[in-house]
Amino acid sequence: TGERVHTLESLKLLNALLVSLHAGFGIITPTIVLSRFSASTRASIAKNIVAGFTGSGHAHVGACKAAMSLFKKLKLVNDNSAENKVRDIFCNIKPIPGFGHPILNLDPRNEMLSSLIHSSGEEFEYFALYQQVVSVVLQDYQLHPNVDLIAAAVMLDLGLDPSYKDIMYDLTR
């Protein structure tokens, strides 16, 4: 979107995000399995790609878009009562976007991306909001974030428009 000047560190973060989005449920990821089934019929590459995109619904990769929207709202109202704002904005939606994972109790991709952000020495505004949200949800619901939540913060910090989230997920898979 042109809002951020991209440094080598931010490009490394984008690369790490793309690798993280690739690693989900393995071959049972809806965006992967649908393409594989299509390919098994010897359909064209274009049809296989379309089949993969059909797996990008609200229940799969939809949490990233929802979290991006909620982060933008949180940024507008962030103040001294941040914990209450997190509860008002994020925790009123069930399931809470970007939390829980059907296979991983603790998603290692979040720790890896967080570590990369901390070591970059750069300031990432949405990542700071991510940390606030994680703290509140862990305290109130004992839920750990999944890659959708940190992906939302990283994409926003890199200046990517929320409309790119499906493309980011699907192209990595």
Image (cartoon, rainbow, N blue to C red):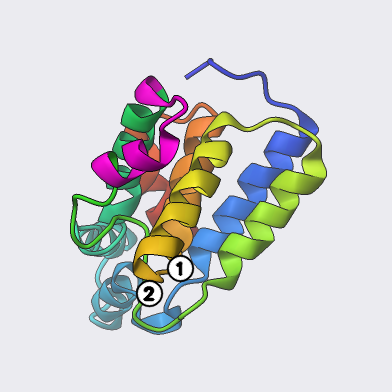
* Element assignment for label 1: loop
Closer to the camera: disc 2 or disc 1?
A: 1
Q: Which mark is residue 101?
A: 2
Q: Amino acid at mark 2?
A: His
Residue at image coords 67%, 62%: 112
* Element assignment for label 2: loop
Residue 49 appearing in the image: yes
In x, y percent, where is residue 36?
33, 78
**Mark-to-mark CA distance, 2 and 1:** 8 Å
Q: Quadrant of the C terminus?
A: bottom left
Q: Give neighbour class at mark 1: few <14, some 14-19, many 20+ (Cα, 10 Å).
A: many
Residue at image coords 38%, 36%: 71
Residue 171 appearing in the image: no
> Magenta residues, as a range?
76-88
Magenta stretch, main secondary structure, is helix
Residue at image coords 26%, 73%: 34
In x, y percent, where is residue 164?
37, 38
Circles 2 and 1: CB atoms closer than 8 Å: yes
Residue 43 quadrant: bottom left
> Who comes first in sequence, dot 2 or dot 1?
2
Q: Which mark is residue 14?
A: none
**Relative to 25, residue 137 above or below:** above
**Relative to 47, residue 151 above or below:** above
Q: Amino acid at mark 1?
A: His
In x, y percent, where is residue 48?
29, 65
In x, y percent, where is residue 52?
29, 63
Judging depth in this view, the residue of 37 and 59 nearest the camera is 59
Label 1 belongs to which residue? 144
Residue at image coords 37%, 74%: 101
Q: Residue furthest top?
A: 2
Judging depth in this view, the residue of 69 and 144 nearest the camera is 144
